[in-house]
Amino acid sequence: MNYQKLNSLGIEIPSILMPKMTDLSKWSVIACDQYTQDRDYWEKAKAFTRGEPSTLNMIFPEVFLSDDDPCCSNSVASGIADIHSTMKRYLQDGVFREPLKGFMYIERDTPYQKKRRGLVAAIDLEKYDWHPDVRPLIRCTEGTVPERLPPRCNIRRGAPIEFPHVLLLIDDEKNSLLPALGENIKNKTPCYSTQLMMNSGSVTGWFIDDEKNISLIEKTLDDLCQRSVNRYDKTAAMNPFLFAVGDGNHSLAAAKEIWEEYKAKNKEQRAENGEEGAYLSHPCRYALVEIENIYDPAILFEPIHRVVFDIGFDETVSLLSVLPDFSCRVAESAEKLSQECAKPFAGNRLGIISEGRYALIETSASGISTACLQPLLDSFAGDNPQLIDYIHDEKELFRLADSLAESKTERKVTGIILPPVLKSGLFETVARTGPLPRKSFSMGHSCEKRFYLEGRRLF
């Protein structure tokens, strides 16, 4: 079968690495950018996987990214060296099966939703760009912070294997691809089926390498691509928009940066050796991702709340008071505050939790709440972006804000609740205006994030 059409759609059929072990509950670990204020989660994950091959040994949980944190047993540099060493050792020790060239159709059950469908594939980084002023086939949905890329680049640079937590969205309104693949493939024995640690549900994967299903993938994606030309931004008829990065924006941006580095390093050398263009087929040109449909009913968009350090209740209210038609009123309890933030409103509602006090902020600023909020927080943080953290679950936000308020430390902290996020119109908005402010939405709760499972060789 000729795969030129798939390649033109930014898709490369990957050679997928899977471990030989049959119990994958200790192998598969949640995305590294989750539970960034919950060391206990990651310590429990370490204890659960201790002594067993696990993707936990090949990732760097972001909770441990601070060099000078006394809770870190190793520096970031030595931690990355350990990751690369573990990858090489796993390859040498026969932890993996022979690679499977094809796609992986998966179904995920979470504590909140059933049968969330996805397709693991490789995408061409030549058809992706994270910079806000470009309109490639594969586009980021949120602003990328260049300062957050170096640790991710250092992990990928020289890593022999990649494990994805990037989720790409397609705008498949008729839900014509993933359910059809599921129906076609269910008569086959799954490649794997496993429970996910820390009560995060389960996932099952079926391998796809037959012409019928690959043709279905190709045709459906081609139809969506052709439709996109006039569906969103009619002034950009030459810029089809097929994939939106729903999760893992910074990880994919890091993969792009490493590919650009590789190209620059090898272009001149290969040309001198008479191999001009050969380097363009190197595996690091591609990145493994999971493709999901934005219209999948099992995908719920959730706001990503904020925790801001070194600022108290009164200072936060003052900071936000510049918002248009600003108003502030006291809330009786956390529950009341949560309920008020969730109610439909013409502008935006934000909840403030600080120093044991609760308040509801209202503003006429319309659109996604991060558009009016994030610039104010960035202005406060200045050259210290670490003063802002991003929390995916409202309950976790309340727990964190309350625990910090009750602690003996004199450091002030404020939690900010954001209102619900609607997923309708995401493609249109990104097509018209480019990426949203960073951390504008989350695809589900923290425990619903992608778990590392499938891998792919890079070098």
Image: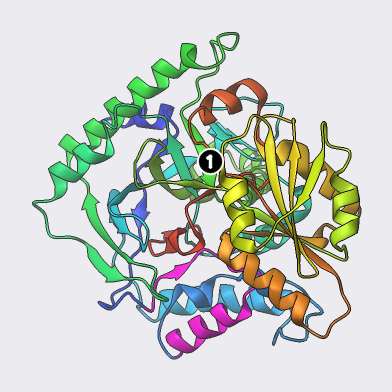
Q: Is residue 328 magenta?
A: no
- Disc 1 marks a residue whose amino acid type is Val
- Residue pushed farthest front? 332
Residue 46 x, y percent position in the rendering: 51, 84
Relative to 101, does residue 332 appear above or below in the rendering?
below
Q: Horizontal placement of 136 versus 436: left or right?
A: left
Residue bearing mark 1: 245
Q: Is residue 231 visible?
A: yes
Relative to 446, does residue 182 appear above or below in the rendering?
above
| Point 47% across, 53% down: residue | 444
Image quarter of the N terminus = top left
Viewer-closest of 62 and 282? 62
- Residue pushed farthest left? 187
Relative to 77, does residue 247 appear above or below in the rendering?
above
Q: Horizontal placement of 202 versus 281: left or right?
A: left
Q: Which residues are magenta?
A: 26-50
| Point 38% across, 79% down: residue | 26
Q: Is residue 40 magenta?
A: yes
| Point 82% across, 62% down: residue | 387
Viewer-closest of 409 and 5? 409
What kind of element bears circle 1?
strand
Residue 410 x, y percent position in the rendering: 89, 79
